[in-house]
Image (spheres, helix red, strand yellow):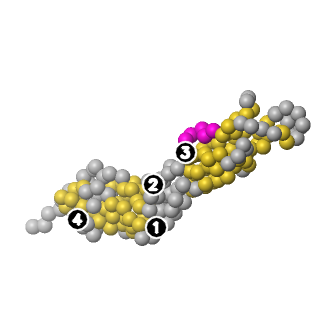
């Protein structure tokens, strides 16, 4: 075997969930792909977890509470190998309804934005289900919201004027609530004498 030429980390790519763990191993090779002994250091590029060394060329990566992409490197002198780890969210825990600052008129469409989140407030991209919409006046339309990739942005109407209402969304035993907002009286449709 010759001098160290390149390092392979296995697995080279993987997907785990928030707080999940993955064992990685680094192997060194010469220019002819013959295995050579190595002694180096493990490094995290983005700080989305922690490494626990398990010997000279093995480590255990444990993800933190945030989703994202992490690059793990094994560095030996001027040579390094890399592995790409995707950290996905946990399952649905709640819905975030973006604040509603407009004061819509009764019967007037306005847009709401709802995001499916896990217990650590990470976006749950895999959530593609129906949510049930209600409000305090019980006049919201539509009554359902179809999520795509963990998000629903849609137009709704509330037909009863009120100084304060709140929109609720629920699915699979999980829920979310908007801020309180006013619905103004609608325009006069006509007069009868």
Which residues fall within the magenta stretch?
43-47
Q: CA distance from mark 3 to mark 2?
A: 13 Å
Quadrant containing the N terminus in the rendered view: top right
Q: Residue at x 50, y 57 (%)?
A: 124
Of the numbered discs 1 and 3, the one sitting upstream in the chain is 3
Furthest-front residue in view? 55
Of the numbered discs 3 and 2, the one sitting upstream in the chain is 3
Picture disc at residue 120: 2
Q: Label 3: few (<14), some or many (≥20) within 10 Å?
A: many
Of the numbered discs 1 and 4, the one sitting upstream in the chain is 1
Q: Quadrant of residue 77?
A: top right
Q: Residue at x 88, y 33 (%)?
A: 2
Q: CA distance from mark 2 to mark 4?
A: 36 Å
Asked if the residue under mark 2 is in contact with the one under mark 1, i.e. CB atoms within 8 Å, the reply is no
- Looking at the rendered structure, the secondary structure element under dot 4 is loop
Foreground residue among 15 and 6: 6
- Looking at the rendered structure, the secondary structure element under dot 2 is loop
Dot in front, 1 or 4: 1
Q: CA distance from mark 1 to mark 4?
A: 25 Å
**Residue 129 placement, left or right of 61:** left
* Residue carrying label 1: 130
Asked if the residue under mark 4 is in contact with the one under mark 1, i.e. CB atoms within 8 Å, the reply is no
How far from the left and from the top, in percent, is residue 59?
67, 47
Dot in front, 2 or 4: 2
Picture disc at residue 48: 3
Of the numbered discs 3 and 4, the one sitting upstream in the chain is 3
Q: Residue at x 56, y 46 (%)?
A: 49
* Residue carrying label 4: 160
Q: CA distance from mark 3 to mark 4?
A: 47 Å
Q: Label 1: few (<14), some or many (≥20) within 10 Å?
A: some
């Amino acid at each position: 075997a010759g001098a160290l030429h390149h390092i392979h980390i296995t697995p080279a790519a993987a997907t785990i969930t928030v707080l999940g763990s993955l064992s990685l191993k680094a192997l060194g090779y010469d220019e002819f792909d013959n295995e050579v002994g190595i002694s180096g250091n493990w490094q995290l590029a983005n700080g989305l977890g922690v490494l626990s060394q398990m010997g000279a060329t093995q480590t255990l990566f444990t993800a933190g509470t945030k989703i994202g992409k992490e690059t793990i490197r094994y560095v030996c002198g001027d040579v390094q190998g890399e592995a790409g780890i995707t950290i996905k969210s946990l399952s649905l825990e709640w819905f975030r309804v973006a604040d509603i600052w407009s004061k819509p008129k009764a019967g007037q469409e306005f847009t709401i934005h709802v995001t499916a989140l896990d217990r650590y407030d990470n976006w749950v991209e895999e959530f593609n289900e129906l949510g049930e919409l209600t409000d305090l006046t019980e006049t919201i339309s539509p009554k359902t919201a179809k999520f795509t990739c963990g998000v629903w942005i849609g137009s709704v109407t509330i037909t009863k004027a009120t100084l304060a209402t709140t929109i609720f969304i629920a699915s699979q035993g999980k829920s979310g609530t908007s801020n309180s907002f006013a619905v103004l009286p609608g325009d006069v449709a006509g007069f009868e004498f």
